[in-house]
Image (cartoon, grey):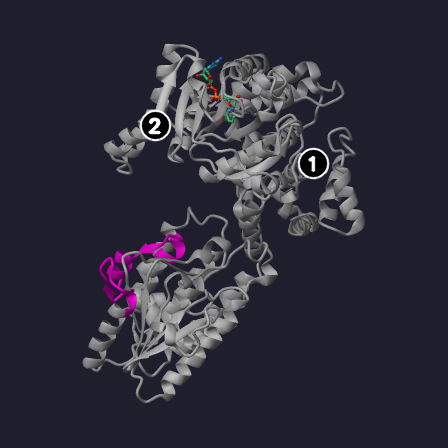
Amino acid sequence: MSDLASSPNPNAAAPLLWQQHGPVLALQLQRAPVLADQAVVCAALQQALQQAQDDAATQAVLLLAGPAWDGALDAAAVQGDAARTPDGQALRAACQGIEAFPKPVIAVLQQRVQGAGLELALAAHYRLALPSARLAWADWALGLPPAAGGMARALRWMGAEAAAAWLLGGKALTAQQACDAGLVDQLLADGDDALAAGLAWAGQLLAQQAGPRPASAQLLASPEQALAELDAQEQAQRKSSRGLQAPGLILQALRTAVQQPWAQALAGQQAVFEQARGSAQHAALLHAAWAERAAAQVPEARAAAPRPVHCIGVVGGGTMGAGIAVAALNAGLLVTMIERDAQALARGQANVEKVYDGLIAKGRMSEQAKADTMARFAASTDYAALAEVDLVIEAVFEDLAVKQAVFAQLERVCKPGAVLATNTSYLDIDAIAAATGRPQDVIGLHFFSPAHIMKLLEIVVPAQAAPDVVATAFALAARMKKTPVRAGVCDGFIGNRILAVYKQAADYLMEDGASPYEIDAAVRGFGYPMGPFQVTDLAGGDIGWATRKRRAATRDPRARYVEIADRICERGWFGQKTGRGFYRYVEGARSGQPDEEVLAIAAAERARKGITPRSFSADEIMRRYMAAMVNEGAKVVQEGIALRPLDVDAVFLGGYGFPRWRGGPMHWADAQGLQTILADIQAFAQEDALFWQPAQLLQQLVAQGRNFASLNAAAATTEEQTP
Ligand code: NAD
């Protein structure tokens, strides 16, 4: 807005630029009112408003902001520390100042309008929007309701139904939707100049002698109906808000705003904001958002530049290969798929096309867009087609010999410097790398199923991997919009290694007397979408069975081994795909029914081993399940398989359905107190000292009165100090 260059404070670092245009004072926010800046930006706004109030020639105020309306809290900027979340006091005062201003205040919205910026916009008396505007309560994802009256104002501008749907749904409104909902008074045209359009509109208002129009003066037609609409929205959003505390607080504030006068409505809103700001859920959600970003900060990505990647090869067109191919195509890459024979190749290509056909059927993709995308896809049974690719991802059967044979082929055909990646879930990547003469180019890229949807990507770094290969993997992850987490080589890396241990804890619970249904219910009650036995049925019991058989020879003979799942698999009950597993599935159903025969199998196994069944409360089930998870998580950090506890959290949030509002297993453990977890492990060790060996790291931290967060903080400090 060059017109404002001659403003009294033309310094680009100033929080606000202002200039008089006849009777209109135009104010442009330069910095988002968020974090430490919030008080500075809001004070500058208040000062400008005071001047406009005192100046008789000023008849209206125009608020222009562009990107600076994006005032959402940034988890990375506050390093995941809820103690640094602004208290909203300055923002409340600024919003109140705008609301009560005796002359019309008009906001012109464009691009992202969220967080504190959205609060200011709603406090204005009139709103215009460019088509680019997107209005979102972004802090919602961090468990924070609006801080400064935004809920009460949304209610008055839009009515209860639309306001609740917007506030509870967590989705952005487009400019058009905001206009339809009554939140925006006029939708401007694409390409309109915000200042010129705003001044023209202000001119019309003044010509009509329209005065200020505070939200507080807008009355709800029928408070009874508004309350009924809030009840209906509560029902509609119940499923998606399971376990979350913010939706309940938002509804509480909206109900207060319907039933009470304006001052109490604002006070009620402030109370719920403060409650949320000080809550464990806000701390957990903030940590989750931060951990996912911090996980991408790894030494190799700082030390080396990534190799260029334009075209990639995918070996194997099964479940994973096809999903990886789609993820790569969606990232704009050229993809060549290799399969064993023509039939498998046709199946692989069909698997890719099926994803796009699904999008077309849902109206989310055009035939032309599919054709354009598939034009970047090639398929062959000849490895020579990989001669020019920059990176290959192998996704063939989970068998070391098969993978080693594939890598020997890759070494033969791929150009020097090509990155050779494997999607193995468990296998030793050092052994795979050793099958080539270029182990420095080999890395693990462990995608999760479905690979084009799941955000998590474990980047598994074998001993000899070159730093720029690791940097290339992280750059690829960013391009594919994945959450990358660095992992070291071990059986199962971070996620599957820890999963194997807490799954074992679940098996022990089952053999000791808890039914799989009680265990699944307890795990769902904790906030997971599914319990471990439901997951087994979904993935296919045969997969775990094959792994157990593979590991039988190397299993510690002293270790307790539960055979209930084997007895079930021996009957050909592999879960959903066979209609029976731990649950029974009636034709076509995805949710199963408890099965008396499964309970009988478990009872027979207990009898065979002379185990007297006992009952477990949901609380005890979860204490054991989580203690196993956290203990193995600590071992994974202690061994350097995960760089920091936050990496374990990012893995479980992104790939294993861990409830986000609990922040990840390591954050959860900190919140419980590590001494409590250690005491549990030591008590369980009385029953089975081999399984319940407390991690040294856990014992050390407890002895030092420290927690996992202190390790995250120490790692962040080291990073800051590394150039
Ligand atoms: P899949 O059986 O669906 O697909 C494997 C494909 O590889 C088949 O289409 C097969 O024809 C092909 N193939 C086998 N040998 C080949 C060769 N020499 N050259 C070319 N193609 C060959 O298996 P999947 O579920 O896609 O798993 C593939 C890999 O991904 C495994 O290592 C698995 O552990 C890993 N993984 C699987 C999942 C999952 O949930 N399915 C998740 C993460 C990782």
Label 2 crowd bin: few (<14), some (14–19), many (20+), radius 10 Å: some
- 145 or 416, nearer to the observer: 416
Percent x, y of residue 7: 39, 77
* Earlier residue among tags 2 and 1: 2
Q: Is residue 259 left or right of residue 423?
A: left
* Residue drawn 56% across the image and 25% down it: 425
Residue 597, image x, y percentages:
52, 21
Question: In the figure, 714 relative to 188: above or below?
Answer: above
Q: Give the residue at x 25% y 67%.
A: 185
Give the residue drawn at x 46%, y 76%. Answer: 44
**What amino acid type is highlighted by mark number 2?**
Arg
Query: Where does the image place residue 689, in percent across and percent down from the top left?
Result: 78, 31
Does the magenta-highlighted stretch encompass residue 193?
A: yes
Give the image quarter of residue 127. Answer: bottom left
- Name the spot of residue 589 as percent of width and height, x first: 38, 28
Position of 679 relative to 146 (above/below): above
- From this viewpoint, which residue is outermost toward the right? 703
**Separation (CA) of disc 2 from disc 1:** 39 Å
Dot 2 falls on a residue whose secondary structure is loop
On screen, 279 above or below 414? below
Q: Which residue is mark 2?
A: 376
Viewer-side residue, 600 vs 697 = 697
* Magenta span of residues: 166-195
Q: Nearer the viewer, mark 2 or mark 1?
A: 2
Which amino acid type is marked by label 1?
Answer: Gly
Q: Quadrant of the N terminus?
A: bottom left
In screen coordinates, is 647 left or right of 169?
Answer: right
Taking the spot 39% from the left edge, 50% from the top edge, the residue there is 237
Residue that carries the numbered disc 1 in the rendered image = 640
Q: Quadrant of residue 516?
A: top right
